[in-house]
Amino acid sequence: MASEEDVLRTEIRWSYVVAGATALILGAILFAGLARGINPPSNLERIDPKTLHLTGEFAEGNLGTRVAPNGDVTVRIVTTQFAFVPQCVVVPTGRRVTLRFASPDVIHGVLVAGTNVNTMVIPGYVAQVHSTFTKTGDLLTPCHEYCGLGHSQMWAVVRAVPPDRFAADAEGRANCDRL
Amino acid sequence: MNAPAGSSRFTVLAGSAIGAILLGGMLFGFALLPIIQGRQAGIDAWTAFCRSLGIGPGTPAASSPADTAAPRPVSDVAWTGATLAALAGAAPAAPPEAAQQCASCHGEKGIAIDPAFPNLAGQSAAAIFKQLHDYRSGARAHDVMTPMAQGLAEEDLAPLAVHFASQPKGSLDVTARADRNLPVADLVFRGDPARGIPACQACHGARSGGPIETPTLSRQNEAYLADQLRRYASGERGNDIYGRMRGFAAKLTEDEIKRLAAFYAWTE
C-alpha cells in the first residue's frame, strides 16, 4: 500500500502538469492577443441611450459606411428592437474597417458570419470592433443576443466588395443602393 | 491528527504556484496585453492600463473619422425619467381643458367621429405623448394636428395623453368583424424572417416589451391604420425613431397593408 510520501510525490508530479497546462493556456491567450489581435472587445466609451437619436454620431443621417479623407473606413450601426439600422452596409475587402455599434433600447448582439466581428451591444456603451474583410459577398449578420419577441427576425447584411468596386460619394458615404 | 511530513512544503509550493499564476494572469491581462495593443492604437501605457481596469471613460482605441454631418433628429422626444414620471401619473379626475379641442375629431371619450381619424381611447399614454410632441416640433405634419399641437404648451401634453389613455376602448361589432377576418396571422404573429419583417405583435402586442412609444393597434380605425402604413412606406411620415416603421412598411405589399389594417381594426 502506498505511503503518505508516495501520495504526496504523485500529487506534486501532477501539480507540475497542471502548472504546465495553465502556462500553455496563458501563452495561447498572449499569442492570440499579440500576434493575431484577438481579444474581447475592450473599447470603453459611454453614450446616453435616451438621447442616442439626438446626438451627433448615431443620429439617423450619420449611420452607415463613411470614408474619412485619410482613407479610414468606419461603419456605424444602431441595433434596435427589432432591426439593424441600416439593414445593409457596404465595406471594402482588404482594408481595415472600424465597426461601431450602439443601442437605444436593450442589449443586442452582432455577429458577422465568417469574420472576427462578434460583440454584444449594451445600451449606454459604444461597441467597437476592427476587422479586415477577406471574403466578398453578402455576409449574414444576425442579432445573437435575445432582445425580445422579434429577435429571430432581426438580421442585417454586410456587403463586402472588392476595393475597385467600393465607391464613396463626395461626403465619404457608401451604401448598398450605390452598388 | 498530526500533519504528514512534507505537507507544509506542499502547501507552500501549491500556494506559490497558484499565486504566481494569478499574478501572472493579472499582469498579462491588465498590463502587458493592453499596453502592447494600445501602442498600435496610439495610446500611452498609463492610459492603456487604466482602460483595461475600466477606470475612466476611454476614447476610442483607434481614432475613427470625425462625423461632420449635423444630427437631424427624426423626433425630439427623449424618454427621460421626468417624461416617464409625468406619464406614469394617475389620470386627472376631470378631463384637461385642452381635451375639448381634441373631442371635435377624436370624440369626447377618445372614439373618433370619423374612421379617418385615430381612436385615442385606451391608447398608450407614451404613444399619444410622442405624437403630440412630434406634431409640435414638426417631426410629424398634419394640416389640422400641427396647429392644434403647437397651440398646446409642453406641460399640457402629458395630462392629455394620460386622460385619453385611461378611457375604455370602443366595443367591437362582432357581425361586421366576421367579413373582415382576413388571413394575415402569419405576419402578425410570426413575421417574415426572409424579408426581415418582425412579427407586428413583437412590439404592438400587449406588454410585448418593444420600444416605449409603440402604440396599441387593436380596435384602431381600419382606414387610419392602412393610411399610416402607406405613409410610412412612401416616407411621407417619418417620425419613427431609426425608421423602424418606415423600413418594415416599405417591405409590405398593398394587399398586406389592407389585411393588416383590417386585422387590427377588428381584433381584441
Image (cartoon, coloured by chain):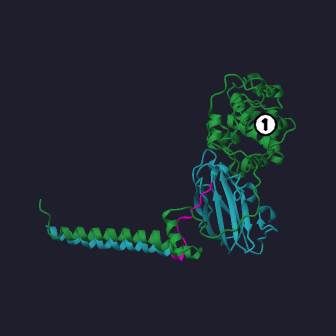
Residue A123 vs residue B149: left or right?
A: left
Q: Amino acid at mark 1?
A: Leu
Nearest to the observer: residue B143 or residue A115: B143
Nearest to the observer: residue B165 or residue A33: B165
Quadrant housing residue B227? top right
Residue B60 vs residue B115: left or right?
A: left
Identify the residue shown where x is 72% and y is 59%: A63
**Quarter of the figure with the C terminus of chain B:** top right
SS for tag 1?
Answer: helix
Q: Position of residue B256 (x, y in %)?
A: 78, 41
Chain A: its colour in the image is cyan
Nearest to the observer: residue A35 or residue B257: A35
Q: Which residue is mark 1?
A: B225
Range of residues picked out in magenta: A34-47
Q: Position of residue B107 (x, y in %)?
A: 79, 25
Quadrant housing residue B220? top right
Chain ID at mark 1: B
Chain B: its colour in the image is green
Q: Main secondary structure of the magenta part?
A: loop
Compared to residue B244, the image places residue B267 above or below, namely above
